Image (cartoon, rainbow, N blue to C red):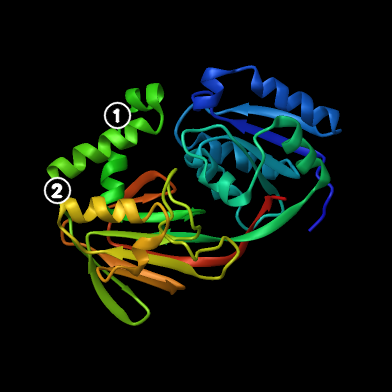
Amino acid sequence: METNLKKASLIYNPTAGALRRDPEQLERLMCALREQGIEISPLATTYAGHATDLAQQAVDERADVVIVCGGDGTINEVAQSLVGTETALAVWPCGTANVLAEELHLPRNPKALANLIACGSTRTISVGRAMKPETDWQRYFLLMAGIGLDASIVQGVDLGLKRLTGIGAYLASGIDYLARLPITPFSIDFNGQRYESTFAVIANAAHYAVWFTIAPQAKLDDEKLDICLFNVRSRLAYLGYAFLSMTGKHTRSSGVVYQEAREAKANSNDAALVQLDGDVVGNLPMQFEIVPQALRVVAP
């Protein structure tokens, strides 16, 4: 789909890994955008959730596009205000994890990204929605919801170590978690059946974190979610699945359930943790559903 994107807000996270290493690259992106005739308003985030407020401001001011410079967590915050609007989302990958940029095949070069935005090449993708039963709480996710093991690993990440080593902080937290293996089982219902699990990924995209492909058949523009369940309590089994998931071969294992669904509901007696796009958002119980064709994104 071709449009004409001329007015843009640039929301950036000053603590994002690439910006800490090379702060001047933000100016290079803005120069490249201005060379393309795009009116740009830079907006820095200063607290958790700030990107959502800034994106809503951009929508209210009728921006054609919101460009996000940060990791998947910052992108998720921005998306909360853009879902269901005419304002498009553009991503410049410069955070610890940039899974959405990989899914959309977006360039890292500032001039290439500016040219893509100026050309107005967009597509519409579906998003996931997580909801707390009997409350008004809801939150969208672009990539995945994770229940159990991975949410606990995210919860255990040392933020100081993350600033120093990036993805290494997640590896350290994962090793620590597997050493202790504090399993929190839960049940999850979808497609008319109930399953027991210790780790579940409800995916809207194929890639997961940096190296893994947990839901190899998932596509951003599908009108479904791909659900991958693991129900094991063994360190060795989880390490084996981690190795297989680097190529998506874990789905062939007898101990893994992999299905498509439009909605799911998960419960836990021990209040298992839930993460959305890499940020812990709360505990079970929680419901999940697909929201078809909900967000415009800049993409080749």
Residue 7 position within the rendered picture, expressed as x and y whole percent measured from the top left: 79, 38
Q: Are marks 1 and 2 in contact (CB under 8 Å)?
A: no
Classify mark 2: residues with Cα within 10 Å, few (<14), some (14-19) or many (20+).
few
167 or 252, nearer to the observer: 252
- Using the rendered image of the protein, determine whether residue 90 is visible from the camera's viewpoint: yes
Q: What residue is shown with label 1?
A: 158
Residue 237 sits above or below residue 76 on the image: below
95 or 189, nearer to the observer: 95
Q: Quadrant of residue 153?
A: top left
Classify mark 1: residues with Cα within 10 Å, few (<14), some (14-19) or many (20+).
few
Q: Which three-letter amino acid code belongs to the residue tagged 1?
A: Asp
235 or 88, nearer to the observer: 235
Q: Quadrant of residue 257?
A: bottom left
Q: Which three-letter amino acid code belongs to the residue tagged 2?
A: Pro
Residue 125 position within the rendered picture, expressed as x and y whole percent measured from the top left: 62, 60
Q: Is residue 29 left or right of residue 161?
A: right
